[in-house]
Image (cartoon, helix red, strand yellow):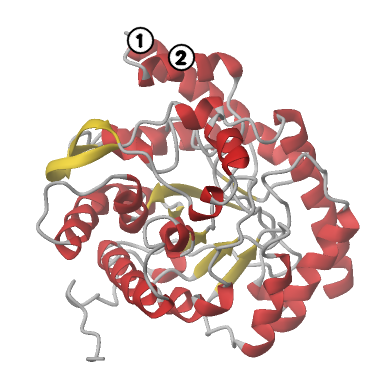
Amino acid sequence: MAAHRPIFGDTPDAPCYKSAPMRRSTERFLTTHTGSLPRPDDLIRTMFAKEEGVPVDAAALAAHIRSAVGEVVRKQAAAGVDVVNDGEFSKPSYATYIKDRLHGFGGTSQPLQYQDLVDFPGMARRVFGDPGRARRKTPACTGPITVRDARAAQTDVENLKLALGQVKAEDTFMSAASPGVISLFFRNDHYASREAYLSAIAEAMKHEYETVAKAGFVLQVDCPDLAMGRHIQYAGLSLDEFRAMARLHIEALDHALANIPPDQVRMHLCWGNYEGPHHYDVPLADIIDLVLAARPSGVSFEAANPRHAHEWKVFERVKLPEGKVLIPGVLDSTTNFVEHPELVAERIGRYARLVGRENVIAGTDCGFGTWVGQAAVDPEIAWAKLNSMAAGARLASREFW
């Protein structure tokens, strides 16, 4: 096989503004989550209406989102979450929101096929019958991709800054879709090649990424394509072929992040936030080298659910590169069990012993509101889980500090 050559150009080493690096666990284990949190019922109803084309008062919706962000930031602080965000309240889902912020997407929704659910049709009906998932809009790319709403990301920043005036937080992050996950959800019907499609997405998403970073927040780029993509977008490829495509996705991501310092960025790795068999999930061991080579310093990943909870052992063999931070999930985001604080502490400790306590932040497998109306975990139980994570982090901190 010929040597792989980057196609997106060089990545500069220096940011174009002052860096605001992510906080590390220096005196105790910090806690965070993946991004999406349960939305208020009335906000869900309004956002459902908007997604379905029902006329919505834009000013009233904006005020509602601003108020809800203030409340969710207060609830995170009260639950003991150290690194907080806006709950992704302005977005119908973590990836599909870009159809409202970028030009180039139109037509009817393009359904995704999950290889593991093909084997279990009954489970597929349950997964795709989720009221929120069923309403997701994923039109194809049908034209040139450019920024459509340059104000949206700045509004998100302003809402979060306003909310932070009322609470004390160790650090703050905001999430955004990666070029690769956008290409997963939105089929390319316009560009001549996958490389050209990814390049166009990367260029357009720079605006949102840099808006978040310039505000002084940690940017989280959501990258389920690097794991979930194996059994959805690239299910027909061999592992080597999939890894080649993953490299392409990472090159596009790194290019889009070129003006942001690595220590102000974390990435989220995910195999799909749904309760299902997941028996086609690509093992972490098969992709961890690619993930750790990507530009972001922080790596958030599923580490609590039954399919991936054993993969802490990967770090017995894999050395964490200097400057990298692991954010393993210590809470399963698809079940209504509230993890015991001692189990949370045990999970944190496994990683701390292998990679160093200062290189571990406790997180969640995925979000509790990945799309508007997600119903996997009861909202009150989601907050109970976050409380348990904070309690477990305190237990682990007593052992390691």
Q: In the displayed structure, would residue 142 be above or below residue 117?
A: above
Answer yes or no: do the residues labelled 1 and 2 have beta carbons within 8 Å? yes
The image shows residue 226 at horizontal and vertical percentages of 43, 64
The circle drawn on residue 197 is: none
**Quadrant placement of the N terminus:** bottom left
> Is residue 373 shown to the viewer in this render?
no
Query: Which amino acid type is shown beneath numbered disc 1?
Result: Val
**Residue at image mark 2:** 46
The image shows residue 35 at horizontal and vertical percentages of 54, 45
Residue drawn at x 18%, y 56% is 197
> Is residue 47 shown to the viewer in this render?
yes
Left or right of residue 62: residue 299: right
Q: How many marks?
A: 2
N-terminal of the pair, mark 1 or mark 2, is 2
Q: Quadrant of residue 36?
A: top right
Left or right of residue 282: residue 385: right
Q: In the displayed structure, would residue 9 be above or below residue 345?
A: below
Query: Which of the pair 216/379 is nearer the observer?
Result: 379
**Quadrant placement of the C terminus:** bottom right
* Neighbours of disc 2 within 10 Å: few (<14), some (14-19), many (20+): some
* Neighbours of disc 1 within 10 Å: few (<14), some (14-19), many (20+): few
Secondary structure type for disc 1: loop
Q: In the displayed structure, would residue 73 be above or below residue 252?
A: above
Q: CA distance from mark 1 to mark 2?
A: 7 Å
The image shows residue 4 at horizontal and vertical percentages of 25, 85
Residue drawn at x 18%, y 71% is 8
**Residue at image mark 1:** 56
Query: Which amino acid type is shown beneath numbered disc 2?
Result: Thr
Residue drawn at x 68%, y 67% is 25
Secondary structure type for disc 2: helix
The image shows residue 199 at horizontal and vertical percentages of 18, 61
Left or right of residue 189: residue 240: right
